[in-house]
Every structure is written in C-alpha cells, then in structure tokens.
Amino acid sequence: MIIVRFLIDVLIIAGGVFALAGALGVLKMPDTLCRMQASTCIPTLGTICVALGAILYAAFFKHSAADAVKIAVIALMIIVTNPIGSHVLARGAYTSAKREGTEMLLNVDDYGRDFHE
C-alpha cells in the first residue's frame, strides 16, 4: 500500500506541475495560437495525471468503485472537449485575423490552404 500511496502522490504532484506549466505558458507565449496550445495540451496531461491519482485513491483507500467511475468519466470528458474547444478557438482567431488584415506570424499557413486563400 505504501507504493500505491507514493504513486498517487507522484501523479497528483505531476498534474499540478503540468497545470502550473500551462499557466506559465499562457503568460509567456508570444501569440494567440501558441497560448492556446499551452492552455490546452499541457493542462490536459495534468488532468490525466490528477485523475489517475484520484482514481487510484478512490479504488485503494476509499474502496469506492462509484467514485472511481465518476472521476474517469469527468477525465474522459475533459480529454474529449479540450482539443475540440482549442480547435474552434484557433480557427476563430485565424479567421478573425484574416478579416481584420492583421498578421498571425505563421510560418506554415495550413488554415489558408483549407480556406482556399
């Protein structure tokens, strides 16, 4: 049980570190698209770590399968919705910048190819 408790602690601390790195990435990144990547990819990994730690805690220490399933469903919803939301925001930021004529500082313009511009 000590090994499981150590693993739970490591997973929760790693999740917190990833969440902190995502927050710092939002502050330090130069443009909109980089900020969106820092605000979705890294915290999603942090959410996975925290959820795994919470699932292990619920399963081994609380002996509650219902809590473990609830945590897994919440983590699954976050894993599914974060990339979709990020894609929608990135596409909106791109089209907004194109309409206003501002430059997004993109090295490769894959969205322009998709929009036939």
Image: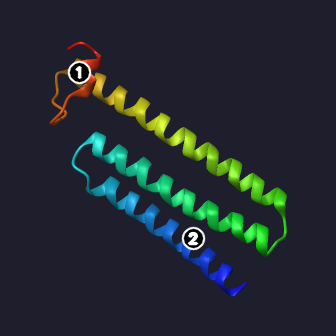
| Residue 2 found in image quarter | bottom right
Residue extending farthest top: 116
Q: Earlier in the sequence, mark 2 or mark 1?
A: 2
Q: CA distance from mark 2 to mark 1?
A: 40 Å
Residue that label 1 marks: 112
Q: Secondary structure at mark 2?
A: helix
Can you say which quadrant of the picture contains the C terminus? top left
Q: Is 28 on the left-hand or right-hand side of 80? A: left
The answer to which quarter of the image holds residue 8 is bottom right
Q: Quadrant of residue 103?
A: top left
Residue 88 disc label: none
Please tell me the numbered disc located at residue 12. 2
Asked if 8 appears above or below 50 in the picture, the reply is below
Can you give x and y, in whole percent of width and height, for residue 63 in the image? Answer: 84, 70
Give neighbour class at mark 1: few <14, some 14-19, many 20+ (Cα, 10 Å).
few
Q: Amino acid at mark 2?
A: Ile
Colour scheme used in the picture? rainbow
Q: Position of residue 112 (x, y in %)?
A: 23, 21
Q: Residue furthest bottom?
A: 2
Q: Which one is nearer the viewer's eye here, 66 or 2?
A: 2
Say which element carries label 1: helix
